[in-house]
């Protein structure tokens, strides 16, 4: 592995905490403001559909931004681009506090995403710098546990902030979180990859670099699994405020607790995945859990379509679906990054961009086919899980097992 720093196990674990904080900024930026959708619509004199576009623009910004920062992280190292990106995020968060209309908020959420996506790409690239083989999946699983704390606490904090201080104060909290992470990075995070002048930032060279990544069969197969899983997640994120608050009648604070409990299920799955990796290959875990998620998705769709699911059963099936997601993301990320070292930033960026583009399409689907019921959400979850299962099964059958992927 090129330029891997000599770090002890304890140092690596401490760095994983910081990387988890970097990756968690993105979920905080999404989940904390969800309970404020209705308040935003009232204050900016618009409707929920237009407020939903702030989520769509954010996801689109993440998708585009990752393609921009991946080669930059490979060319200039990790630390400096990450700090610059997070400072951009801070500036956009401050701007969101003062927007006079929904159009300004839509635009600034796009800029905010461009800034915070560097933490998402950078955290995965640094994991690839520090680990190899199944150790990547174990490290990703630990990140998933840390990553899962954000959705647990963010909606609850958001609901409390909206009720006590108004929705604009949410962006004050987001700015404070970002500033804390920047300070930790500046003080603690070492450089894990030296500058590489051989990596060009010319658009044509960047495009050729991404095409090289796409030629890798292992990357394509597991990027499809991860993209399908993330599309299901964003379908849930987009539809859940309406389903739980407007349709089921929960107040914003109760919605925060439900959202947090589902995120806890995802986080616990990430911890369980670390244990399973001692006995099973990442590809095997991926195949099994994608099948379970597909079965849960079909049960959710059937029950919702026939209108026979009580609220508690519906919530339980959604939690089970998200529990499976906690296995799918770390293993698919580990397997698609495994063939790369020198250009891990580009591979991580391309994977992240594909997952966010899939999330954008899924989010738009749920919004466009909004019918006043939970059926569009159930359709999206079932379809995404089915695609992920088919992709995982094909990968298991067609791809050779690399020695580096063995536990």
Image (cartoon, rainbow, N blue to C red):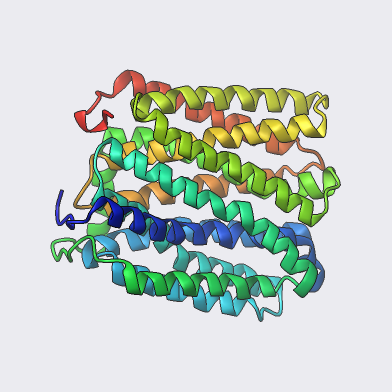
Q: Quadrant of the C terminus?
A: top left
Give the quarter of the image for residue 84.
bottom left
Q: Is residue 152 left or right of residue 357?
A: right
Residue drawn at (46%, 65%) of the image? 116
Q: Is residue 210 visible?
A: yes
Task: Give above or below for 137 relative to 111.
Answer: above
Task: Give above or below for 252 relative to 77.
Answer: above
Q: Position of residue 334 (x, y in %)?
A: 34, 40
Give the quarter of the image for residue 320.
top right
Direction top: furthest residue: 397
Direction right: furthest residue: 249
What number of labels is visible? 0
Q: Position of residue 403 (x, y in %)?
A: 20, 28
Residue drawn at (24%, 42%) of the image? 132
Direction front: furthest residue: 10
Q: Is residue 65 visible?
A: no
Q: Along the line of sight, which residue is nearer the eye, 16 or 76? A: 16
Residue drawn at (35%, 58%) of the image? 14
Give the quarter of the image for residue 274.
top left
Q: Position of residue 324 (x, y in %)?
A: 54, 32
Q: Is residue 275 left or right of residue 260?
A: left
Q: Position of residue 396 (x, y in %)?
A: 35, 22
Residue drawn at (57%, 46%) of the image? 361
Task: Give above or below for 381 relative to 386.
Answer: below
């Amino acid at each position: 592995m090129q330029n891997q720093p000599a770090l002890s196990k304890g140092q690596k674990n401490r760095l994983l905490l910081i990387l988890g904080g970097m990756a968690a900024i993105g979920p905080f930026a999404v989940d904390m403001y969800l309970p404020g959708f209705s308040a935003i619509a009232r204050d900016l004199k618009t409707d929920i559909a237009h407020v939903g576009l702030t989520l769509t623009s954010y996801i689109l910004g993440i998708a585009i931004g990752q393609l921009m920062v991946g080669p930059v992280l490979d060319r200039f190292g990790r630390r400096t681009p990450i700090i610059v990106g997070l400072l951009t995020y801070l500036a956009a968060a401050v701007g969101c506090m003062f927007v006079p209309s929904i159009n300004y908020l839509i635009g600034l959420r796009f800029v905010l995403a461009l800034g915070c996506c560097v933490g998402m790409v950078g955290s995965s690239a640094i994991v690839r710098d520090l680990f190899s083989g199944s150790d990547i999946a174990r490290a990703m699983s630990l990140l998933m546990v840390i990553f899962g704390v954000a959705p647990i606490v963010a909606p609850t904090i958001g609901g409390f902030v909206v009720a006590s201080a108004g929705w604009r104060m949410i962006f004050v909290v987001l700015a404070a979180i970002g500033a804390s992470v920047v300070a930790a990075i500046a003080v603690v995070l070492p450089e894990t990859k030296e500058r590489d002048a051989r990596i060009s930032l010319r658009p044509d060279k960047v495009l050729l670099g991404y095409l090289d990544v796409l030629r890798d069969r292992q990357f394509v197969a597991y990027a499809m699994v991860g993209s399908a899983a993330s599309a299901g997640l964003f379908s849930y994120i987009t539809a859940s405020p309406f389903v739980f608050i407007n349709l089921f009648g929960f107040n914003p604070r109760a919605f925060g607790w439900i959202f947090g409990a589902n995120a806890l299920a995802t986080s616990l799955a990430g911890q369980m995945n670390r244990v399973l990796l001692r006995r099973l290959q990442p590809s095997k875990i991926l195949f099994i859990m994608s099948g379970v998620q597909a079965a849960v998705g079909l049960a959710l769709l059937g029950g919702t379509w026939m209108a026979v699911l009580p609220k508690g059963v519906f919530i339980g099936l959604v939690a089970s679906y998200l529990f499976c997601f906690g296995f799918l993301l770390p293993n698919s990320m580990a397997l698609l990054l495994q063939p790369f070292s020198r250009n891990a930033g580009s591979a991580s960026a391309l994977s992240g961009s594909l997952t966010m583009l899939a999330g954008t399409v899924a989010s738009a689907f749920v919004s466009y086919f909004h019918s006043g019921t939970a059926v569009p959400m159930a359709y999206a979850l079932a379809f995404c899980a089915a695609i992920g299962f088919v992709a995982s099964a094909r990968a298991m059958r067609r791809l050779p097992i690399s020695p580096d992927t063995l536990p």
